[in-house]
Amino acid sequence: MPDPAVPDLPSGPPVRWPGTAAPAPDGGAGREAPVREAPVREALGQLRERRGLFVHGPAGIGKSTLLAAVATALRYEGVTVLRCAPAAEDAELPFLGLVDLFAPVPDALIAELPSGPRAGLLTALGRRGGADGRPDRLMVRVAVLDVLLRLAARAPVLLLLDGVQWLDEPSADALAFAVRRTDGADVRIAVARRAAEGERPERADWYPPDTAELAVPPLPDGEVARLLRAAGTGLPPRVLRAVLRTAAGNPFYARELARHAPREGVPAEDGGFLPVPAALRARALEGADGLSAAARRALLVACLADRPTLPLLRAAGVPDPQAALAEAERAGLAGADAAQRVRFRHPLVRAALHSAAAEGERRAAHARLAAAVTEPAAAARHLALAHPGEDAAVAAVVMAAAHAARGHGDPDAAVELAELALRRTPASRPADYDQRLLDAADFACDAGRWEECERAARTVLAHADSPRGRVRARLVLLRGAGQALRGHAELIEEGLRDAAGAPELEAPLYHWAAVRGLLTGSLDEAARHAARAERCAARAGNSGLRIAALSTLARVRSLAGEAAGAEAALVQAMALADDGPRGRDLKRMRAVLALESDRVGAARRDLDELLLTAGESDGVEATVASLVALTRAQVRAGACREALATAARCSAIAAEAGRESAPALYASALAQAFGGAAAEARRLAVRAVAAARADGDQLFLLRSLAVLGQTGLFTGERAQVAEGVESLREAVDLGASMGAADPSLLGWYADLAEALARLGETAAAVGVLRAARRRAGRMPDSVLAALERAEGLCAAAEGRPAEGAQLLRSSAGRLRPLELPVDLARTLTALGTVERRARHRTTARTVLAQARQLAEDGGALPLAERAAAELARVDGPPGGLAAAALTPAEARISDLVRGGATNREVAAQLFISVKTVEGTLSRLYRRFGVRSRTALAHVLASMPQTSRETHP
């Protein structure tokens, strides 16, 4: 029997939920949806399939943001959204939830209700008083259901309850009654409920039976960092990392922590913990009020330990850690797992416990941990934090631990320990203080903390009485300058005056003079200084400095084209080296020399092993140098996808160090030029050129100019090829002025000649190739192959296609045994182009297919697109040029796309939908046998103008 209190469903055609409707009459998909984060897309998808959605997560994780995005999207699609967001203080106010939900419901609709339900609802909503001031709750329930059904007859309805844990009981009761009775109408409900970290709250039994559940995930660190930058927090990298680590993906926590974070860095005296503001601390420690004093002490010891375990707490004097952690687990703060490791509910809990503890309590806990932990660096840190005053013995222990941490490849720990040691060094021992300050500056260099490094070294340089101390301070400043050594000649000259003939001090200064000469392009000067540094180091008995000087000498000789001399210097250095950082530097140098001599497989093996063994323990600069070399090796080996990943890792390390690094930018530009997008490659190459110019780094200015030129050359667009000529010409001229003659530079001669030939400037191209041949001497086969490729293109451009094809076949023959697929793909594409123009279609088709396959297999997308575009030209589109003629719409779209417009920009300019643009481009791709916008542009550029004229 029907429920007499439930009104009949309205009659009429069913109203569909957005996204479930049949396609529009024109076959389109309707309005294009905006791009949303994955949880929003998932929430929308669930609501389109189900009647309910239950969203949960901890405070601040983004539940409200998610539901607001869902509501905006659904309102845009015609859904009626009724929303309430009660707060804790609202839970005792009857019907306040309904007041908020029904605020947008017009009085006219409520006036249509039967008199009893209408009176009850109006009284509940406070729009009129009842006989006794209290509404009839049954009539309110019936009215709520009736209103929802009437609204659903007009459009789909979404009830959105954000913070349902604070919804007042009368409102919840009315909604429960209504939701259970709306099966036949399009009424859906989305509910958000706060949950403790890692917990899944119970959902109410009145939610629809098919309600989906969505736990809002933490935001990725990159998203949180972007949010903080948009808020203008301006945190330095180390502080930002601490905020991200403590917030663990919670955007609200991150904003609050960032507002109160120290801008100059997280002091070592705070144990690496960020300050937690009182309100956030109270939220993180909610539930801690009922803890016993023993449990509180146990939690404090656990939060201060790096890797807390129950045995460690026991060793640190906690009498019954298991019982204490059980109590903390009941409070929802922390617990112990099966392996007896202490796990905090959230990193913020640890930071909040630290902030809430009194200084004396923290010192006592650190003292107990100093006696309990077995790892020396951790014990030293706890010892220092337990004794904050000046103490020579404590300072010595902590400084020894800092040196040990550096030796174990943990530069950040070394910096932190050195800072603690400095604060405990007595003022009566200034020599010890200066020595430790310079050690700390060295450790900061390892960690990429350049400002700290310079500040410490300049402090010592300003007041040091000892010439030895001043020399060491200058050496630290030279090291901290990175690639920007051009303006630091005075540091070297003043240092040599202070060194006063002491070979142990002169050796490192002459070595830095050699490095400066290398980077500024003074190769003869660099070689002289490197040789002198090696002799001084030998007299001083310093094998490490001898190795560094010989390694630099090997680099100089390699750049000058003296492969045998470079190899000899490297062999001499390796005879002195062990497996430490110096030995790893030599292994990197050996890989670079192997790369220059076409032994790409050996170079990759050495570099992979080096990075696997050392990780990032040798410091930022050494790691970046290894990753740059590996990116070059991967590109040459046809592993362009791997090169993109390696370059991204290199950029991330440089960015964390807070320095615009020309080497890292160059590596990213190189990887993009061969394996990514031309526009991105050009953007990165321009930045690399600017960074190298600012540093006075001629070595990476050469490389960055070359990759900028290659990017223009690979596009095939005349304007960009012309731009590439200018960059390549500057690289070639700069290399000649430096006296460089290494294989890479001679390869850039070939690129310059190829670009000039493409522009029809064959006489200039021939002149470039003659100059390269004069400088070549004994060059690797890859360089000779590159020169032959350019010579072949020049011959073909001058009307000698047979001679050009022969040179290109010779180039390909040199490359096939070398396992250099990218170089071979370039040569085969050039050969296919020459053969096509000579109307040798079968040959052209064969070699171009090989070129495309080689490039695709290696992920060299720009080269694959060029080969595909040439392949499409071999026979032309099906049906000849008549079939290739574009319609007026196709012509307008293709012209804008060739000009660089995005699909959305094309749609806006032509007043059409993005879907129409996408569909047109897909048809053109199929017609011309290409796979990308770039390849399509190549095909259209090669078509005679008449074939691109449109017909009505």
Image (cartoon, grey):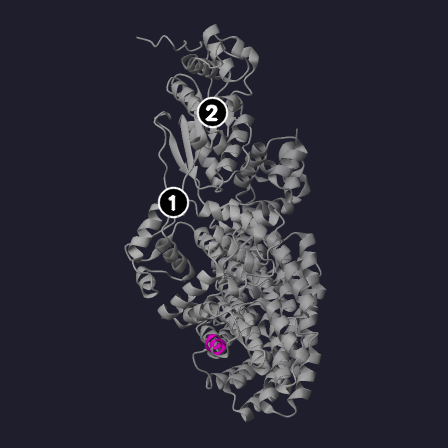
Residue 678 lies in the magenta-colored region: no
- Residue at the disc numbered 2: 159
- Residue at the disc numbered 1: 198
Q: Position of residue 657 (x, y in %)?
A: 57, 63
Please count the marks in the image: 2
The disc labelled 1 sits on which kind of residue?
Gly
Image quarter where the C terminus lies is top right
| 735 relative to 141 in the view: left or right | right
The disc labelled 2 sits on which kind of residue?
Leu
Q: Position of residue 284 (x, y in %)?
A: 45, 47
Element type where label 1 sits in the image: loop
Q: Residues within 10 Å of mark 2 (few under 14, many from 20)?
A: many
| 424 relative to 579 in the view: left or right | right
Q: Quadrant of residue 660?
A: bottom right
Q: Position of residue 397 (x, y in %)?
A: 45, 77
Q: Which residues are magenta?
A: 394-400
Q: Residues within 10 Å of mark 1 (few under 14, many from 20)?
A: few
- Cα distance in 3D space between marks 2 and 1: 27 Å
